[in-house]
Image: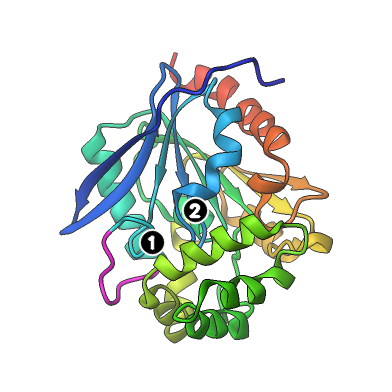
Amino acid sequence: MTPRFRLPALDHHYVSTGGLRLHYTELPSAGTPLILFHGIGMDWRVWQALTRHLAPFFHLYAFDLRGHGDSDKPGHGYTVAHYAADIEDAIDQLGLTFSAVVGSSLGGMVAGALEVPLDLVTHRILLDPPLTGGPIKDEHMFRTILQLKHQPEESLAAFLAPYNPHAGSFLMRTMAQMWKQAADGVIEDMLEQPRAYNAIEPALRINESETLLVQADPAMGGVLTDREAQEALRVLPRGHLAKMLGAGHAVHAYKPRELTQMIVDFVRPQLLTSTR
């Protein structure tokens, strides 16, 4: 169980990476560094439901990926490799060591694609990443979002609602706001070069970190298929799989308590072993 805990003040910072400024939030503590990466079109705010549960255990960092939130928004350069290079630079500049990373959807692909030494990132948790290696899933949805993000917020929220049937109106408005703030290139680059966008298998093969794939419930809109999960486990040197029944694609929003316990159980014992 998550202990009673008074949430400390949230700090907002920027770090320069390859000529871009990345925005990130920080909840300081004496715990292990845990770095959070959101999904496409979102920003650091998607982690708010999970933060209260994670904060007693970890020193938290939640990044806005390039083109998202309050980070810089170049016209193009939105493949997973671009996102990962930014984060690799940020981890180095912030001097983070023996860290764990958690990524949702696109953020999970970024977490898997990081090419960093084991003493910098010891554990990776990938939440329902779309590891297709080919055409983008739900291409129609993304093309429609690209059109509607320049329309009134209500139109985009209404379009997103059927894709998130268990979310309330407030969450839909927040998601619409985040999408409207994201750069158009985030979607355009993904649609124009899908294989370059999600080609992370080479990085998975050389990933030395303990890596946990968390598969959402397909009946609730999960996108990581059994076949994709097994293929990822085949190439990951230290891969593990957990299935989160009853949780949709945004696992962290559906089951924050259960996910927190899963992360703590996965990271803490092995981290103690790796740092002795």
> In the structure shown, which secondary structural element does the residue marked by tag 2 occupy?
loop
Ranked by sequence position, the earlier of labels 1 and 2 is 2
Estimate the x, y position of residue 124 in percent, counting from the top left.
52, 41
Q: Which mark is residue 38?
A: 2
Q: Nearer the viewer, residue 235 or 54?
A: 54
Residue at the spot x=50%, y=23% of the render? 7
Q: Is residue 107 above or below residue 185?
A: above
**Coloring scheme used:** rainbow
Quadrant the C terminus occupies: top left
Q: Amino acid at mark 2?
A: His
Quarter holding the N terminus is top right
Asked if residue 200 shows in the view, the reply is no
Q: Secondary structure at mark 1?
A: loop
Q: Nearer the viewer, residue 209 or 104?
A: 104
Magenta span main SS = loop
Classed neighbour count for the residue bearing mark 2: other residues with Cα under 10 Å, few (<14), some (14–19), many (≥20)? many
Residue 131: % across, % down: 59, 65
Residue 29 occupies quadrant: top left
Judge from the rendering whether residue 20 lies leftward or rightward of residue 23; answer left or right. left
Of labels 1 and 2, the one closer to you: 1
Q: Which residues are magenta?
A: 72-79
Mark 1–mark 2 Cα distance, whole angstroms, equals: 9 Å
- Report the residue at 33% width, 61% height from top: 66
Q: Residue 77: which quarter of the image?
A: bottom left
Q: Are marks 1 and 2 in contact (CB under 8 Å)?
A: yes
Amino acid of disc 1 = His
Residue shown at 36%/77% (left/top)?
A: 185
Q: x%, y% of residue 172? A: 63, 62
Per the image, the residue denoted by label 1 is 68
Q: Is residue 172 left or right of residue 35?
A: right
